[in-house]
């Protein structure tokens, strides 16, 4: 079936006339002879809109009750049954009331389009997902329900309904504005004219992007796209803070303006670890990126700007979006910051620095050594500059008592230098201080000789203490860096465990995460063929190994083919190709290898469990069947046996009435036994997939009436409401009557005497939906699935009426006829069983 066309009227704010234009379009189409109906239109107190809608056929709305309140929503089933050529559905961003078939109205529209029905709808620019944060800043209020931009862009036609802000306010003052009580700018509701101007600009810019996309499609379809530039790819860097939401939406708008660009988000776990990254915030931002049509990536790197640029170049990115850091001038002296450094390294990649609220100061790029180059240079400068100043401050030697004080001051200088610049500046300060003390403060003065052995000992101890302090400080800095890297590695593995291993293809996702983290060309998990020898010489032969899983181009076929070979056990090995990671990365690579082996085994266990599931289901069915046979078949057999034994007894003489009663009991018991055995046999055929179906075109009314005749007096109160022009249904006559008999009989059992069941039907798409409606106690939604489990009665304590196979068998028979059978809640209480079968 051809999918219907979607036309959307886009407006900057409520009251611009979207609904009015939609109704005018409906009248034009009806004048051209098209079948147009109103699925849902919100007049909201506007007389002109109500007058336009009154001139069109309107499908009655459906009342949905939730927590004691009643809500009116579009009756999707009724619209599908009416099957018009065009249907009007106002406010596509609306969220349906709880209990409706779909959560969002756009899902109702999707269903109508899939049924081949054209839809005309409306939406405000404030409901676009990518613009929600901008609308909030403009109006000071959240936009409420949002709709993905990609969903709106798929419309066949988008038309802007524009109006000047002054006209909107004038219209509202005359009572012709939109009085809908939603969050957002309502004309005349105290909103500043500047807000309406800003929203109008957003609508114009958004539609301009849509026009660009249509122009590109036209050029492509007509061969006019020669020399067209490569696809843009926008990468947004996320630090794990709340500002990421703004950056993601801004990057999405940048990608949208770049005519279908790819959107990618990346988080770099650097040497500082993940202390500043909130995992919950990252998880939410990941969902936001995916909702906007992008992908989320997690990489590891000591230097954040370098890691970002390497990732961007690795994915052929053309634009990079970063959050601007509002740092003090003093902070910029010591580190230019991530944004400035990334901009300097970007080359041909465009870098966007986005200002945002709540921005955090960035510590800048992290050095690869224990201390940064800047700190080491500062330490050397301190050592070279402070010693002369110290000598001048103490003064030229004139008293030997100055020597201890000078020694302590130089030791303090060495300690300070080690704290600032690490070991090497401290060693320079220690040696220079040693020489200074020897030259200026020990006899003979102004020479390097030492006469007093105690002074020699003091200087030697000073030198040892100074070197020791510098070494300890340097080791402490190095251990701090290693701890931060370990934290970053743990964060990466935690992210892997959280969102990779929970996917539908955990092994491939894990290998892809490893390849992406270390910028590899390919990663392969190899498994030794059963029965092949193990040894170093055999790790080069690809005939002895099979590829259990791989990602990237040209994966290694043997452990010796790659740049790095990580043995997991005697039968598994992880092969990395493309570059040789640093030795410090070996530990995290081995953790990836262990996780990949675990993922491989879990995947195989899942496959084995899936293969064993049918066997377990068959065993469960067999156990239930034996339990049912032991009870349900015993009762009619016992009744029939007792009746026949009594009639054959020579010890008791029965009169004609007693004999008739016994014969009737035996006949009824045998009929029940025949029905039970038939149900069991049919269920067995359905389970085995050998149920014979002879589908023919037949009128539904005759089948329903025939079923009611079979039910006898019990079927007389059933109300039948079938349209006269109802199309024939394609089904097996015997199976259809059996299904209807089971479902109608079940409805009769639970319906009150004063409200008998109703059987109705309507066309829906290519099918015919039959509804058996009762007004009994109903079934909670949590129990809808268990209604169709064989050999149970969902709390029914009557064990004399069957095996509990009725609904399970009925659904199986309907599915055998290429149909569906689903329960629904009857408005006001009760159960509605919907049986959908193909139309003739």
Image: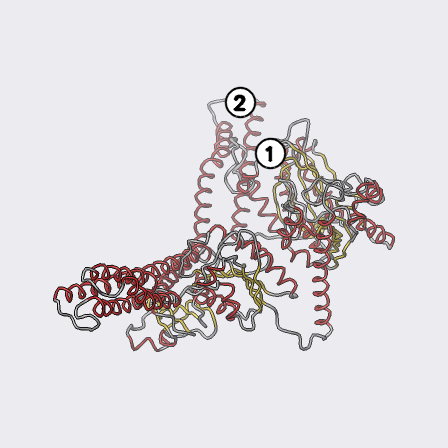
Q: Residues within 10 Å of mark 2 (few under 14, many from 20)?
A: some
Query: Secondary structure under badge 2?
Result: loop
Query: Secondary structure under badge 1?
Result: loop
**Residue 644 image position (x, y, % from top left):** 50, 31
> Which residue in the structure is indicated by mark 2?
654
**Residue 731 image position (x, y, % from top left):** 67, 50
Q: Nearer the viewer, residue 701 or 420?
A: 420
Tell me the quarter of the picture where residue 752 sits. Answer: top right
**Residue 314 image position (x, y, % from top left):** 50, 70
Q: Which mark is residue 778?
A: 1
User: What's the residue at 49%, 27% (across, down)?
Assistant: 646
**Colour scheme:** secondary structure
Q: Nearer the viewer, mark 2 or mark 1?
A: 1
- Residue 458 horizontal side relative to residue 480, left or right: left
Q: Nearer the viewer, residue 776 or 339?
A: 339
Q: Which mark is residue 461?
A: none
Question: From this viewpoint, which residue is outermost toward the front?
Answer: 398
Q: Residues within 10 Å of mark 1 (few under 14, many from 20)?
A: some
* Quadrant assignment for the N terminus: bottom right
Q: Earlier in the sequence, mark 2 or mark 1?
A: 2
**Residue 734 visible:** no
Tell me the quarter of the picture where residue 394 sits. Answer: bottom left
Tally of numbered tags? 2
Q: Is 650 rendered above or below residue 409?
A: above
**Residue 438 image position (x, y, % from top left):** 20, 69
**Residue 269 visible:** yes
């Amino acid at each position: 079936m051809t999918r219907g066309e979607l036309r959307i009227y886009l407006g900057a704010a409520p009251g611009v006339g979207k609904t009015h234009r939609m109704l005018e379009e409906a009248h034009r189409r009806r004048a051209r002879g098209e079948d147009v109906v109103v699925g849902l239109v919100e007049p909201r107190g506007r007389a002109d809109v109500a007058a336009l809608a009154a001139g069109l056929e309107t499908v009655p709305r459906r009342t949905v009750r939730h927590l004691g309140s009643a809500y009116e929503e579009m009756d999707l089933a009724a619209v599908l049954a009416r099957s018009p050529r065009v249907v009007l559905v106002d406010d596509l961003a609306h969220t349906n009331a709880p209990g409706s078939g779909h959560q969002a109205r756009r899902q109702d529209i999707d269903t109508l389009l899939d049924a081949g029905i054209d839809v005309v709808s409306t939406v405000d620019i404030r409901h676009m997902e990518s613009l929600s944060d901008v609308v909030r800043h403009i109006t000071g209020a959240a936009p409420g329900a949002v709709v993905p931009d990609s969903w709106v862009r798929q419309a066949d036609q988008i038309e802007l309904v524009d109006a000047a802000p002054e006209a909107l306010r004038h219209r509202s003052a005359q009572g012709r504005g939109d009085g809908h009580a939603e969050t957002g700018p309502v004309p005349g509701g105290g909103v500043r004219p500047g807000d309406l101007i800003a929203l109008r600009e957003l609508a114009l810019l958004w539609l301009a992007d849509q026009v660009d996309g249509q122009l590109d499609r036209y050029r492509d379809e007509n061969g006019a796209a020669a020399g067209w530039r490569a696809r843009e790819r926008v990468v947004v860097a996320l630090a794990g803070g709340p500002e990421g939401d703004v950056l993601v939406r801004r990057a999405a708008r940048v990608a949208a303006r770049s005519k279908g660009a790819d959107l990618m988000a990346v988080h770099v776990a650097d040497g500082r670890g993940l202390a500043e990254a909130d995992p919950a915030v990252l998880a939410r931002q990941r969902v936001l990126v995916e909702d906007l049509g992008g992908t989320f990536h997690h990489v590891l790197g000591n230097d954040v700007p370098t890691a970002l640029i390497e990732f961007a170049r690795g994915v052929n990115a053309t634009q990079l979006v970063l959050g601007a850091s509002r740092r003090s001038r003093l902070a910029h002296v010591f580190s230019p910051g991530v944004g400035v450094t990334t901009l300097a390294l970007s080359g041909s990649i465009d870098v966007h620095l986005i200002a945002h609220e709540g921005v955090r100061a960035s510590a800048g790029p992290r050095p690869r050594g224990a201390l940064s180059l800047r700190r080491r240079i500062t330490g050397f400068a301190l050592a070279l500059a402070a010693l002369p100043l110290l000598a001048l401050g103490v003064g030229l030697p004139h008293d030997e008592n100055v020597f201890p004080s000078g020694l302590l001051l130089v030791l303090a200088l060495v300690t300070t230098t080690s704290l600032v610049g690490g070991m090497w500046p401290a060693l320079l300060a220690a040696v220079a201080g040693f020489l200074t003390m020897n030259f200026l403060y020990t006899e003979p003065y102004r020479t390097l000789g030492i006469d007093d052995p105690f002074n020699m000992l003091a200087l030697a101890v000073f030198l040892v203490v100074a070197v020791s302090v510098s070494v300890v400080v340097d080791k402490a800095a190095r251990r701090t860096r290693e701890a931060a890297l370990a934290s970053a590695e743990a964060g990466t593995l935690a992210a892997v465990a959280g969102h990779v291993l929970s996917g539908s293809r955990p092994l491939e996702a894990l290998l892809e995460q490893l390849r992406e983290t270390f910028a590899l060309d390919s990663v392969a998990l190899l498994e030794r063929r059963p029965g092949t020898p193990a040894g170093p010489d055999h790790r080069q032969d690809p005939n002895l190994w099979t590829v259990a899983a791989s990602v990237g181009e040209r994966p290694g076929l043997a452990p010796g083919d790659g740049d790095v070979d990580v043995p997991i056990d005697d039968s598994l090995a992880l092969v990395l190709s493309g570059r040789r990671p640093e030795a410090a990365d070996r530990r995290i690579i081995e953790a990836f290898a262990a996780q990949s082996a675990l993922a491989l085994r879990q995947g195989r266990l899942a496959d084995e469990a899936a293969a064993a599931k049918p066997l377990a289901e068959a065993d469960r069915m067999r156990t239930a069947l034996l339990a049912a046979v032991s009870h349900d078949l015993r009762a009619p057999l016992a009744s029939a046996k007792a009746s026949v034994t009594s009639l054959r007894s020579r010890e008791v003489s029965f009169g004609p009435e007693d004999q008739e009663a016994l014969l009737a009991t035996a006949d009824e018991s045998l009929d029940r036994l025949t029905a039970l055995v038939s149900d069991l046999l049919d269920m067995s055929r359905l389970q085995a997939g050998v149920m014979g179906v002879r589908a023919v075109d037949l009128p539904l009314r005759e089948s329903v009436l025939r079923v009611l005749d079979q039910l006898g007096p019990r079927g007389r109160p059933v109300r039948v409401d079938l349209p006269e022009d109802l199309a024939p249904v394609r089904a097996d006559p015997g199976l259809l009557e059996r299904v209807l008999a089971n479902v109608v009989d079940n409805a009769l059992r639970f319906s009150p005497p004063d409200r008998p069941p109703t059987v109705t039907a309507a066309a829906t798409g290519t099918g015919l939906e039959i509804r058996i409606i009762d007004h009994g106690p109903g079934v909670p939604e949590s129990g809808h699935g268990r209604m169709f489990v064989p050999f149970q009665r969902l709390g029914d304590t009557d064990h004399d009426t069957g095996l509990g196979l009725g609904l399970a068998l009925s659904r199986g028979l309907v599915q055998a006829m290429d149909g569906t059978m689903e329960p629904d809640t009857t408005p006001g209480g009760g159960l509605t069983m919907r049986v959908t079968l193909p139309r003739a």
